[in-house]
């Protein structure tokens, strides 16, 4: 950001810079092709930068565009500052204070958190969340992993363990025959793709 601020042809407050190692992504809205080219060129000349991905948008000049550009940069900065959200694959568009989030996140909780981060930014009137989720939790897959881990004979009654899904969290209820089987079931559920939290309501009988 210091390098961009030092270039008089660039308005750094309209640009969000995301760096991962030596790979840098520029996002935001600029008013001209020259500003876009200057931002990319300046970033490439920064020591340690290996590559620059240009995701800058061109917007028409004017007070409304300027306000939206400032809001867009602020939303991108808010997403980048939240370590629980991988902002590298999130695109932000703003029109008259209405924010659209698009791209892909790993988990449902990251999708919801990104929306909350955007809503907390001053100037944001609404958020249209179009983020896709890479790891979608499947109740059937979690149940299969549990039965594979502890065996059907450890479960009391047919289909005794019930799995409910809430975003990327799961709830387990039912009965098993030992504390060991109980702990194994929880571990199997927690290891399922996309699961970030397990609510335990399993009873031990035996």
Image (cartoon, grey):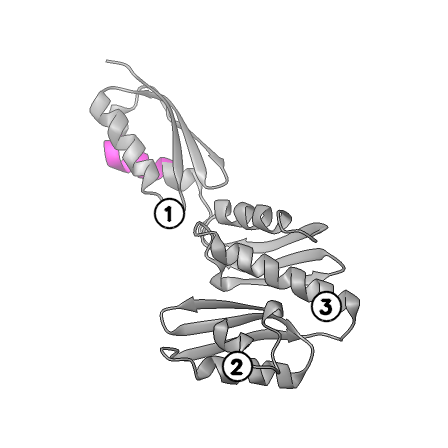
Can residue 93 be seen?
Answer: no
Give the quarter of the image for residue 112. Answer: top right
Q: Which residue is mark 2?
A: 40
Residue 104 got which mark? none
Tell me residue 142's x, y (percent).
38, 38
Q: 190 or 63, which is in the foreground?
A: 63
Q: Which residue is mark 1?
A: 193
Taking depth in this image into account, of 133 and 147 the one nearest to the observer is 133
Residue placed furthest toward the top: 206
Mark 2 and mark 3 lie on one chain; the one further toward the N terminus is 2
Sequence-wise first label, 1 or 2: 2
Query: Mark 2–mark 3 contact, CB under 8 Å?
Result: no
Q: Are marks 1 and 2 in contact (CB under 8 Å)?
A: no
Q: Which region of the structure is painted magenta? A: 143-151
Residue that carries the numbered disc 3 in the rendered image: 66
- The local secondary structure at tag 2 comes to helix
The residue lying at 49 percent from left, 77 percent from top is: 3
Task: Tell which circle, 1 or 3, labels the residue nearer the N-terminal end.
Answer: 3
Viewer-nearest of discs 1 and 3: 3
Please state the horizontal and vertical placement of residue 10, each as a whole percent of the image.
60, 79
Which of labels 1 and 2 is toward the front? 2
Q: Residue, x 58% and y 72% (percent of image)? A: 12
Marks 2 and 3 sit apart, C-alpha to C-alpha, by: 20 Å
**Label 2 Cα crowd, 10 Å radius (few <14 / some 14-19 / many 20+):** many
Q: CA distance from mark 1 to mark 3?
A: 42 Å
Q: Residues within 10 Å of mark 3 (few under 14, many from 20)?
A: some
Q: Residue at x 46, y 78 (%)?
A: 52
Q: Position of residue 49 (x, y in %)?
A: 39, 78
Number of numbered callouts drawn: 3
Q: Position of residue 180 (x, y in %)?
A: 21, 25
């Amino acid at each position: 950001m210091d390098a961009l601020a030092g270039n008089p042809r660039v308005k750094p407050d309209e640009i969000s810079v995301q760096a991962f190692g030596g790979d840098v992504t520029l996002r935001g809205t600029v008013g001209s092709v020259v500003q876009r080219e200057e931002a990319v060129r300046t970033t490439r000349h920064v020591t340690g930068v290996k590559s620059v991905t240009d995701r800058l948008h061109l917007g028409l000049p004017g007070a409304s565009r300027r306000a939206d550009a400032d809001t867009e940069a602020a939303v991108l900065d808010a997403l980048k500052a939240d370590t629980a959200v991988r902002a590298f694959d999130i695109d932000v568009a703003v029109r008259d204070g209405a924010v659209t989030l698009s791209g892909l996140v790993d988990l449902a909780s990251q999708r919801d958190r990104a929306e909350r981060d955007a809503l907390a930014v001053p100037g944001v009137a609404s958020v249209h969340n179009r983020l896709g989720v890479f790891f979608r939790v499947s109740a059937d897959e979690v149940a299969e992993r549990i039965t594979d881990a502890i065996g059907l004979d450890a479960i009391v009654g047919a289909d005794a363990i019930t799995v409910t899904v809430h975003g990327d969290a799961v709830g387990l209820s039912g009965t098993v025959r030992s504390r060991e089987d109980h702990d194994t079931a929880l571990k199997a559920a927690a290891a399922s793709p996309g699961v970030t939290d397990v609510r335990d309501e399993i009873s031990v009988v035996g």
